[in-house]
């Protein structure tokens, strides 16, 4: 049975267009009347509820007086061909311009992340993040690495500093290799393990370690993050999304079959992993070793 095409590109177009409207302190009524639309059409575009035409993007961007580089990036998103998943290529949509992931990460009511080689961004210290940037992007300048570290720090603060009454704590399964794999800066690795030990022993995040003794597992293909969203006012919420990052971009999957499969993989990883208490003790042992 056919499954729907990815909604991620149009959701990001709608999110950015709403941000432009909000920055201008403009109501939906004001904008819809100015461009000759119904409020329902503007609402659907901002919510990503249907395909958005490049001509509509140009019209709204002209009204909002959006900068040319932003308009160009939005048009790239609007022209994405229908596909089962969406690949965000760095050369078309750079991570610091219109990458939908930070906003999705902030909006998610549940975040489940598996990492088998390196610590995920939300758990990294700035020094660890800089070492990762140096390894993954050897061609970057010092300024580019600094922006990368700053973006990750902003994401950590936004997600991990949540207080009572906010969505549930982010959940992580870390392969034991993550704890054993040193980075070039030994002091930075020691600092990172100490930070991870404090997080694992607290209530900000939920961390489990997948021991090497667990053997082969269904996530051997690589790291992924599964994001679930709220359903406001009893209406259907945004589809859950699977995010898989790569060296030149990121893959977004939101077809029901893909989401269900990754949820099953997650459940299998949790079953194979140490308990949260055992994991915290193991991480502390590495930090103190």
Image: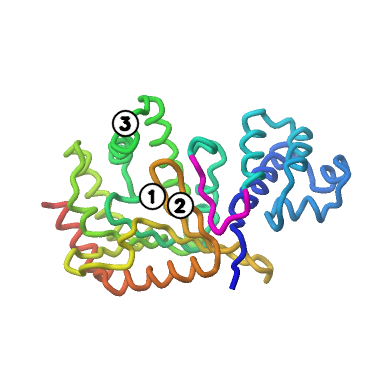
Picture quadrant of residue 27? top right
Tell me the SS state at disc 1.
helix
Residue at 65% of width from left, 51% of height from top? 10
At 30% across and 40% down in the image, what residue appears?
132
Give how far across and how far down residue 91 sits, in percent.
50, 35
Q: Quadrant of the N terminus?
A: bottom right
Q: In what element is the residue under mark 3?
A: loop
The residue mark sitting in front, 3 or 1, is: 3
* Residue at the disc numbered 2: 159
What is the C-alpha distance between the residues marked 2 and 3? 28 Å
Q: Verify CB contact (< 8 Å) between mark 2 and mark 1.
A: yes
Nearer the observer: mark 2 or 1; the answer is: 1
**Which of the two residues, 265 or 280, is positioned nearer the viewer here?**
265
Q: Quadrant of residue 142?
A: top left
Per the image, the residue denoted by label 1 is 122
Compare marks 2 and 3 and give the one earlier in the sequence: 3
Q: Position of residue 201 (x, y in %)?
A: 27, 60
**Mark 2 to mark 1: distance in Å?**
8 Å
* Residue 121 is one of the magenta-drawn residues: no
Image mark for residue 279: none
Query: Which residue matches tag 3?
Result: 138
Using residue 269 as the reference point, say whether residue 151 is left or right of it.
right
Q: Which residues are magenta?
A: 81-89
Query: Residue most toward the left?
Result: 289
* Percent of width and height locating residue 225: 42, 58
- Badge 2 marks a residue whose secondary structure is helix
| Residue appearing at x 65%, y 65% in the figure | 232
Residue 46 vs 96, above or below: the answer is below
Foreground residue among 270 and 69 = 69
**Circle nearer the N terminus (3, 1):** 1
Residue shown at 55% from the left, 55% from the top? 107
**Distance CA(mark 3)–CA(mark 1):** 22 Å
């Amino acid at each position: 049975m056919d499954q729907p095409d990815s909604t991620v590109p149009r959701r990001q177009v709608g999110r950015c267009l709403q941000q432009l409207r909000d920055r201008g302190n403009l109501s939906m009524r004001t904008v819809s009347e100015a461009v000759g639309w119904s409020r329902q059409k503007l609402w659907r575009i901002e919510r990503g509820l249907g395909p958005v035409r490049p001509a509509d993007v140009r019209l709204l961007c002209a009204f909002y007086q959006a900068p040319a580089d932003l308009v160009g990036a939005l048009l790239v998103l609007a022209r994405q061909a229908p596909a089962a998943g969406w690949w965000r290529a760095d050369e078309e949509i750079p991570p610091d311009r219109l990458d939908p992931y930070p906003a999705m990460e902030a909006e998610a009511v549940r975040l489940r992340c598996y990492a088998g080689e390196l610590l995920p961004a939300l758990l990294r210290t700035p020094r660890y993040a800089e070492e990762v940037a140096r390894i993954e992007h050897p061609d970057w300048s010092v300024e580019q690495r600094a922006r990368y570290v700053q973006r990750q720090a902003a994401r950590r603060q936004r997600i991990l500093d949540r207080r009572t009454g906010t969505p549930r704590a982010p959940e992580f399964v870390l392969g034991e290799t993550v704890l054993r794999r040193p980075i070039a800066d030994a002091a930075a690795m020691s600092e990172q393990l100490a930070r991870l030990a404090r997080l694992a022993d607290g209530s900000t995040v939920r961390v489990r370690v997948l021991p090497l003794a667990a053997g082969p597992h269904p996530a051997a293909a690589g790291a992924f993050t599964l994001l679930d969203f709220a359903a406001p006012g009893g209406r259907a919420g945004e589809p859950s999304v699977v995010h898989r990052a790569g060296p030149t971009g990121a893959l977004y999957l939101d077809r029901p079959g893909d989401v269900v499969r990754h949820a099953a993989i997650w459940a299998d990883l949790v079953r194979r992993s140490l308990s949260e208490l055992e994991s915290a003790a193991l991480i502390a042992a590495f930090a103190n070793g």
